[in-house]
Image (cartoon, rainbow, N blue to C red):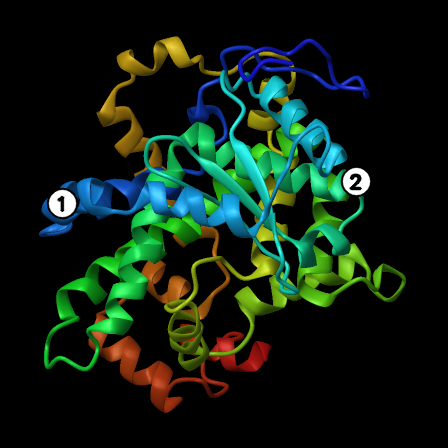
Amino acid sequence: MTETGFEKVPARDRKRFPGISSRAYEHPADRSALVALRKLSGFDTVFKALSGLLPERSLRLLFLSDSVRVGETQFPHLYEMLRDACYILDLEKVPQMYVQQDPKPNAMCIGLDEPIIVVTTGLVELLDEEEMRAVVGHEVGHALSGHAVYRTVLLFLTSLALKVAWIPLGNVAITAIVTALREWFRKSELSADRAGLLVGQDVHASMRGLMKIAGGNHLHEMNVDAFLAQAEEYEAGGDLRDSVLKILNMLPRTHPFTTVRAAELKKWSENRDFQRIMDGHYPRRDEDKDTSVTDSFRQSAAHYADSVRTSKDPLMKLVGDIAGGAGDLGGKLRDKFTGAGTGSGGGPEGKGGATEQG
């Protein structure tokens, strides 16, 4: 096989998506977060500077010298999955892939000029074939979307922030950009999860993989419905203080919480947009240049508005009430935190407030 050709087709009969654009599976929050990131003061300057300074050649040599490169004679089953994923998503060039010794289950797609996919031994040993196929498709989705570039910058800046943390105010600007990059990357993971489903075309395998990442190789002790119920409880439970704690817990993470990812993917798999892609109706790469930026903004705005409207999170419900003119922000925040208005009175706070749901 050549690096750009596919002499063999996938063993299992899966649908292929010739010329598919990443816009077909990108989560609206991914696009909008990336737009917000690019508007961050100083980001363009930092990004352009780092693009020329990042030691990508050194990075490639590191993996070449201290990891196992996947190929026809090393981890051939992973190599076949990689070729399969690139075939299905019509990625012209197959990225290099490495297996790195690390007991923690993880995978990443990095690189500036050409993406590199890295999976850990912990992940390879944890997942079965179909679950691993979804993960490989996830990383190929990152490559197709161009996420590898920003992930590489995030890794470098995170390391840099730690090195200059002892300098007074030395890492303030870096921290701001790292925070914005993490926010974007969490959203990009939702997009890549969708790409993984398009490659694996088995939502149950995707769900199993996420459950294993959360709870280990004990499927006989776990249940998909109960796992998804956790996501529902996480979103709707507690009061406004819990909403704030959720935000604080999320800030240092590069990935969304696993139950949330599972719930998001399950919802998308049942959406007509997913079925349209499976039926062959999807945006093509050759149409990307004609894509309206305004339309992308509009779709992202509509997604966030719908998220706020349908969310069961106490903070999001409060935002929705305020946006709808239900009351003033100061008064509602005070009432939520102090518990005022949560009695059995006839006001809106007396009808099943968030604290009563807990």
Residue for point 76% across, 54% down? 125
Quadrant position of the C terminus in the picture? bottom right
Residue 172 versus residue 82 in the image, above or below? below
Identify the amino acid type marked 1. Answer: Ala
Rendered residue at 73%/59% (across/down): 212
Residue in the picture at 70% in, 44% down? 206
Image point 60% across, 59% down: which residue?
258
Q: Position of residue 143 (x, y in %)?
A: 46, 32
- The CA span between labels 2 and 1 is 41 Å
- Using the image, tell me which numbered label, if any, was put on residue 132: none
| Percent coordinates x, y for residue 150 in the rendering | 32, 44
Q: Quadrant of residue 245?
A: bottom left
Q: Where does residue 20 sit, x and y in percent of width and height?
A: 50, 16
Q: Quadrant of residue 160?
A: bottom left
Q: Who comes first in sequence, dot 2 or dot 1?
A: 1
Q: Which secondary structure lies at badge 2? A: helix
Q: Is residue 287 above or below residue 144?
A: above
What is the three-letter code of the residue carrying label 2? Glu
Answer with left or right where residue 177 lies relative to residue 129: left
- Residues packed near mark 1 inside 10 Å, few (<14), some (14 to 19) or many (20 plus): few
Circle 2 sits on which residue? 129
Is residue 322 visible in the rendered structure shown here?
Answer: no
> Is 204 left, or right, of 247 in this rendering?
right
Instruction: State left or right for residue 248 relative to residue 71.
Output: left
